Amino acid sequence: MEILQELPVDKWPELREKLKKLWPLNLPGYYTLYINLKYPKLREAFHFKVYCPDGDVENGFLGFFDINTQKSVVLFSVKEDTSKIEEALLKTKVLDRSKKVCYDIVTSLTAKIFTRLKGTNGFEICEIYPADMHYLVGTTGPFKDLRAPDNTYLSRVKEEHIQRVDETWPYQHSSSHFYFSTLAAIGLSYGLYSSDTHELISWIFINENCFLCHFYCEEKFRKRGYGEFVLKSAANDLLKDGNDVYCYTVPGNEKPQTILKKLGFVRIDDSAFVMVDNPGKNN
């Protein structure tokens, strides 16, 4: 019998509550479920499905995204014992081991699983990339007196500018144009534009895991507070509903880390994302 059993959408709220047992470590799992419940078009576009080992929410979950050619997985345990998650990774037939898979959100707890599995059957090519997780508690409340800088306006990122967004992303792939276009169409993008030329100056997205991603300001417009404004604008849409805000930075990337610290974000976990690539290998 297949170890991973799909969890119906109406059971996701129950799973979200279980994730609070390890807080704020499981915050990303909680908000991944939240945003895909809030935006059905998002989970449909990215084919998001949730599976629990043995169908039991007490065993945590694996979430699968299928974004055209890009396959990604998130995984969370609701307890310190991650043995069921590890067993599922080894035994499941849901996971196509012949394709490259990105494990998008790996906490310091679940990273230990990949450290153990690296080099074993199905995980022969397993690269672990560190990431710092930053967190702003939802009770902070929205940033006040937020106004667009002079001669600018805030808008969702327009379709004609998605190409520029895509080409500046360090993790660009064959489906990333579709990825950002979808997020923008659903209303999860924030672009600051010049009122005079309608040029896109700075942008940020809320992604399918509900974290702030691809925070960018065009070089000629930097050091004017434009990036900070779009970051606050995106954060406010989450904070106004009492939601926490989180994001990731590459260790040592001081510029965004300085802005995050200034705005009250706290670094809370040594996280990672993991790439597993075993070409030609079947389940």
Image (cartoon, rainbow, N blue to C red):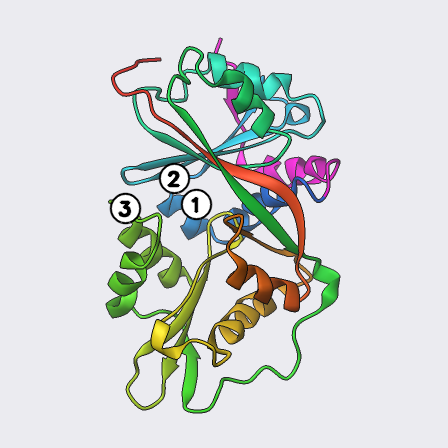
Total residue callouts: 3
How many angstroms separate mark 1 from mark 3 (CA)?
Answer: 16 Å
Depicted 221 relative to depicted 125: above or below: below
Q: Residue at x 64, y 63 (%)?
A: 261
How many angstroms separate mark 3 from mark 2 (CA)?
Answer: 14 Å
> Crowdedness of circle 3 by 10 Å Cα count: few (<14), some, many (20+)?
few
Between marks 3 and 2 in the image, the one whose residue lies nearer the viewer: 3
In terms of depth relative to the viewer, which is nearer, 125 or 14? Answer: 125
- Could you tell me the amino acid type at mark 2? His
Q: Is residue 237 left or right of residue 202?
A: right
Residues rendered magenta in the picture? 1-23
What is the number of the mark on residue 112? none
Depicted 246 relative to depicted 237: above or below: above
- Label 3 sits on a secondary structure element that is loop
Are the residues at dot 3 and dot 2 in contact (C-beta closer than 8 Å)? Answer: no
- Label 2 sits on a secondary structure element that is loop
* Magenta stretch: includes residue 218: no
Q: Residue at x 59, y 25 (%)?
A: 112
Q: Is residue 240 visible?
A: no
Q: Which residue is mark 3?
A: 175
The image shows residue 23 at horizontal and vertical percentages of: 73, 42
Q: Identify the image quadrant of residue 245.
A: bottom right
In terms of depth relative to the viewer, which is nearer, 231 or 96? Answer: 231
Q: Quadrant of the C terminus?
A: top left
What is the number of the mark on residue 43? 1
